[in-house]
Amino acid sequence: MKSWKGLTTAILFAVLGLGMQQPAAAEDKIAFVDFQRVFEQSKVIKRMNEKLQDSIRAEQQTLEKKRDALEKTKEELEKKSGVLNPEARTKKEEELRAELKDLKRYAGDKEEEFQRRGSALMQGIMKELTDIVKVIGNSKGFSAVVERSTGGVIYFAPSSDITEEVVKEYDKRNKNR
C-alpha cells in the first residue's frame, strides 16, 4: 500500500513537473500595411502612373486630331455634295464611313492596350509589394501582416503599421524607374 502511495505521488509530481516545464506559447505579432497609402505616397508608383497617363493623353490628342480631320472631310463633302455626281458622292461617303469605322476600332484597340498595360503595371507592383511585406514581416518577427483597407481591421496600434517601411523599400528598389 505504501508503495502505491509513493508511486502515485511520484507520478503526480512528474506530471506536474512536466506541465510546468512546457514553454509559454510565443506571442503572435501582427502588423498592418495600407496599400492604398503606399500607392498614394510612393514617388516611384506616382511617376509610373504619370508616365502611363501621359501616354494616354498623347494618344487621346492623336485621336482628336484624326476625328477633327474626318469632321473636316465630312464638311467638305457636304459642301461639294451639289457638285459631285451621285456615284462620286456615294463613294466618298463610303470612304468616310470606312475611315470613321477604322478610327473607332483603333480607339477601342488603344483603350484595351492601355487597360492591359495598367493591369500589368498593377500586377507587377502588387507582386513586388507583397514580396517586400513578406521580407519586412519576416525580419521583424510578425506572424501575420494584414492589409488594412481590406482586412476588416477596426483597431490597430500605430506601432504595428509597416506601411511607411514598405513605401521606402519599394521606392529604394525602384528609384531608377
Image (cartoon, helix red, strand yellow):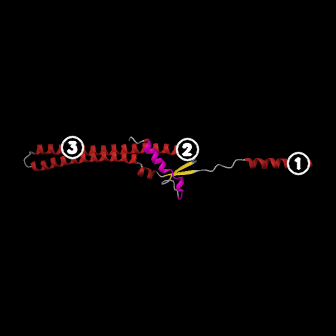
Q: Which residue is found at the position 89% from the left and 48% from the top?
A: 4
Number of numbered discs visible in the structure rendering: 3
Q: Position of residue 101 (x, y in %)?
A: 24, 45
- Magenta run includes residue 169: yes
Amino acid tagged 1: Gly
Closer to the chain start, of discs 2 and 1, is 1
Q: In the image, which disc is placed on residue 99? A: 3
Q: Position of residue 95 (x, y in %)?
A: 18, 43
Amino acid tagged 2: Ser
Closer to the chain start, of discs 3 and 1, is 1
Closer to the chain start, of discs 3 and 2, is 3
Q: In the image, which disc is placed on residue 45? A: none
The local crowd at label 1, few if under 14, some if 14 to 19, many if 20 or more residues have their Cα within 10 Å, is: few
> From mark 3 to mark 2, how far is it between C-alphas?
59 Å
> From mark 2 to mark 1, how far is it between C-alphas?
51 Å
Q: Which residue is found at the position 19% from the left and 48% from the top?
A: 68
Q: Position of residue 51 (x, y in %)?
A: 33, 45
Circle 2 sits on which residue?
Answer: 139
Circle 1 sits on which residue?
Answer: 6
Secondary structure under badge 2?
Answer: helix
| Prevailing secondary structure class for the magenta stretch in the rendered image | helix
Secondary structure under badge 3?
Answer: helix
Q: Which residue is found at the position 29% from the left and 48% from the top?
A: 57
- Residue at far left of view: 83
Q: Position of residue 28 (x, y in %)?
A: 61, 50
Q: Which residues are magenta?
A: 154-172
The local crowd at label 2, few if under 14, some if 14 to 19, many if 20 or more residues have their Cα within 10 Å, is: few
Amino acid tagged 3: Glu
